[in-house]
Image: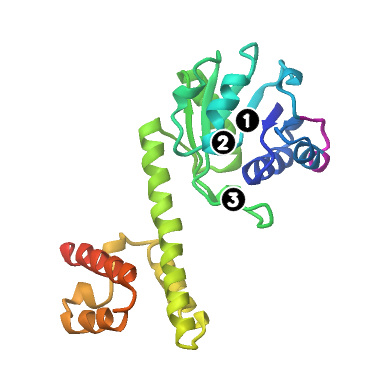
Amino acid sequence: MNIVILGSGNAATHFGQAFQLLGHQIVQIYSKTKANADALAFALQCPGIDDLSQLLRNADLYLIAVSDQAIPRLVETMTQDINGIVVHCSGATDMAILNRFRNYGVIYPPQSLSKNKIVDFSLIPFCVEGSDTSIANSLLQLARTFSSRSILCNSQQRLAIHLSSVMVNNFSNILYQFAYELLEEHNLSFDLVRPIILETAEKVQNHVPITVQTGPAIRGDEATQQKHLKFISNKPDLQQIYQLLSHQITKRK
């Protein structure tokens, strides 16, 4: 396929590299900042542009890989005179935002992407949606060249996947930061809890999370919970989080 990528950040970089590895041709990179367009274009050996009037009209696929906030403005500015399939890769953006184009869809990877970290796309279950059955099946076939675990889902299902990803990734990470700060405050290394982080992550690969829940809340150990709350009495935000999460665990006993 001949592919145009609109964006020059983390997702654009990883998708561009992955497409090339599969033998596809990246024919153009667009970014509102010319230097960014040129940097990714140089890496992928294609032209870079910062003016949408120069957008190629005859590519097979147009991948929008910009921030969620930037998608509406970009879509409004793009010409409708495009022969290929226009897709975005956002988890929280409804597919209908692309309905000004003839053929459109979504290829969303529920994964945190960073330019400097290699990502194995074969391990990611891409979530695919299309403007009609034919487009959906074409995009699913494309996604499955990345990963055999790719699935069809609608915009509501994709939003549920995105929200779940935020909970298990972003929310868990801020809890790691709370733990880091608490340990640092008492001259202790975060290395002390890294093994238990890995153990928990490994357990949920093969179990329903609540079935491997441990800790004072699931045991009904009120004394230990009160001791913890007293220990962080100078941190009301952390106390509130502790109590809320403990209550949710207790409800599921």
Per the model, the C-alpha gap separating discs 3 and 1 is 16 Å
Q: Residue 151 occupies which quadrant of the picture?
A: top left
Quick one: 240 or 148, which is closer to the camera?
A: 240
Q: In this figure, which residue is indicated by the disc labeled 2?
A: 143
Give the magenta range.
42-49
Q: Is residue 137 left or right of residue 81?
A: left
**Amino acid type shown at disc 1:** Leu
Tag 3: amino acid: Leu
In this picture, residue 84 sits left or right of residue 170: right
**Mark 3 crowdedness (10 Å alpha carbons): few <14, some 14-19, many ≥20:** some
Specify the quadrant that holds the C terminus.
Answer: bottom left
Considering only order in the chain, which callout, 2 or 3, is on the residue closer to the N terminus?
A: 3
Q: CA distance from mark 3 to mark 2?
A: 17 Å
Q: Is residue 43 magenta?
A: yes
Give coordinates of residue 29: x percent, y percent. 74, 32
Quick check: marks 2 and 1 in contact, CB under 8 Å? no
- Residue drawn at (29%, 79%) of the image: 233
Front of the two marks 2 and 1? 1
Disc number at residue 15? none
- Kindly state the secondary structure of the residue where label 2 is placed: helix
Q: According to the image, label 3 marks what residue?
A: 113
Q: Nearer the viewer, residue 133 or 45?
A: 45
Circles 3 and 2: CB atoms closer than 8 Å = no
| Residue 114 place in picture, x, y as percent | 63, 53
Magenta span includes 174: no
Q: Amino acid at mark 2?
A: Ala
On the image, the x and y values in percent for residue 246 come to 23, 68
Residue located 50% across and 79% down the image: 190
Give the residue number, with chain letter if any, for mark 1.
63
